[in-house]
Image: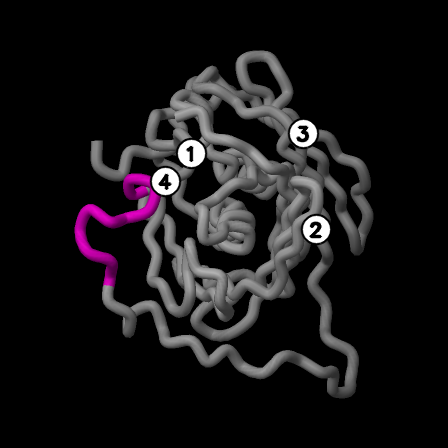
């Protein structure tokens, strides 16, 4: 089914579809769905207009299969300026990942000027030709507009735009925050893939936002990669069409595919 959602609701459970199968085994979900669903549910249950979800960290320690998923949440801190929420991704009764989100109260910037990076000189997504039909990544799991570099290239820079093409949960529109949460798993393959392909599976992802994206496109600009003894780290700056919105990082382990 074209643009089939990643999950369908059944009461309090989320039922995965095959649209969300990842690259590592034939029946396991893509890590982006763990991050996206945990972020989306934290936001849905606990966010109010006075707060921005400024940081989300997700640990991923088990490849979930296509079993029904339950999201369990817990309030760690419910303060006036800072709220901290934990969430757990439970697949088929087993924990597969957990998240911590920090929500900060909106206020005003203090006076004075602070250094910021130079404006991103990347072309807008609408100015970049779409990939040829049949060449969409992961069978059409998302949409990209390559800017510079890419998988299999060891030169820098590596830059690309990404947009979602299907709902995370059927009938639930993406919020800007959930859009970033679902996309941010891309930091690992984009930063850690090499000329022999992708040999690392990320065990976590963290992203920080000072504001949320204003459109469907999220830009990734790789800023760091390092690896020793099968343990890798990667980092990207994150953008929308108006400029930088934050940055993301990950850790990853050497992994062989079973598909």
Q: CA distance from mark 3 to mark 4?
A: 22 Å
Residue 256 position in % (x across, y down): 51, 31
Residue 157 position in % (x across, y down): 49, 70
Residue plotted at (64% across, 20% down): 95
> Relative to 201, does residue 241 appear above or below in the rendering?
below
Residue plotted at (60% across, 37% down): 254
Q: CA distance from mark 1 to mark 4?
A: 20 Å
Query: What residue is disc 2 on?
Result: 103
Q: CA distance from mark 4 to mark 2?
A: 24 Å
* Left or right, 78 with reference to 178: right
Q: Secondary structure at mark 3?
A: strand
Q: CA distance from mark 1 to mark 2?
A: 32 Å
CA neighbours of label 4 inside 10 A, class few (<14), some (14 to 19), many (20+): some
| Residue extent of the magenta highlight | 130-140
Q: CA distance from mark 3 to mark 2?
A: 14 Å
Residue 156 position in % (x across, y down): 50, 69
Query: What residue is disc 3 on?
Result: 73
> Relative to 212, does residue 16 appear above or below in the rendering?
above
Query: What residue is disc 1 on?
Result: 23
Quadrant of the image containing the C terminus:
top left
> Relative to 15, does residue 253 appear above or below in the rendering?
below
| Labels 1, 2: front one | 1
Decide if residue 130 is in sight here.
Answer: yes
* Left or right, 128 with reference to 153: left
CA neighbours of label 2 inside 10 A, class few (<14), some (14 to 19), many (20+): many
Residue 224 position in % (x across, y down): 63, 62
Which disc number belongs to residue 167? 4
Mark 4 and mark 2 residues within 8 Å of each other at the beta carbon: no
Of 222 and 154, the residue lying toward us: 154
Residue plotted at (74% across, 87% down): 113
């Amino acid at each position: 089914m074209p643009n089939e959602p990643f999950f369908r609701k059944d009461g309090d459970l989320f039922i995965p579809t095959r649209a969300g199968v990842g690259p590592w085994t034939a029946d396991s979900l893509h890590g982006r769905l763990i991050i996206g669903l945990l972020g989306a549910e934290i936001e849905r249950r606990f966010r109010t207009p006075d707060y921005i979800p400024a940081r989300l960290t997700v640990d991923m320690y088990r490849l979930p299969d296509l079993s029904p998923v339950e999201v369990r949440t817990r309030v760690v801190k419910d303060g006036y300026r800072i709220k901290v929420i934990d969430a757990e991704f439970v697949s088929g009764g087993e924990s597969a990942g957990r998240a911590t989100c920090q929500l900060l109260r909106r206020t005003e910037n203090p006076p004075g000027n602070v250094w910021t990076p130079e404006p991103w000189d990347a072309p807008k997504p609408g100015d970049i030709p779409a990939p040829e039909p049949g060449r969409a990544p992961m069978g059409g799991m998302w949409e990209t507009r390559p800017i510079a570099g890419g998988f299999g290239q060891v030169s820098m820079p590596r830059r690309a735009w990404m947009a979602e093409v299907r709902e995370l949960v059927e009938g639930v529109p993406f919020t800007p925050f959930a859009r970033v949460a679902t996309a941010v798993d891309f930091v690992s393959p984009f930063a850690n893939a090499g000329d022999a392909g992708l040999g690392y599976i990320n065990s976590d992802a963290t992203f920080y936002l000072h504001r949320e994206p204003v459109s469907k496109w999220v830009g990734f600009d790789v800023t760091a990669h390092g690896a020793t003894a099968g343990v890798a780290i990667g980092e990207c700056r994150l953008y929308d069409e108006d400029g930088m919105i934050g940055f993301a990082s990950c850790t990853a382990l050497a992994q062989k595919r079973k598909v």
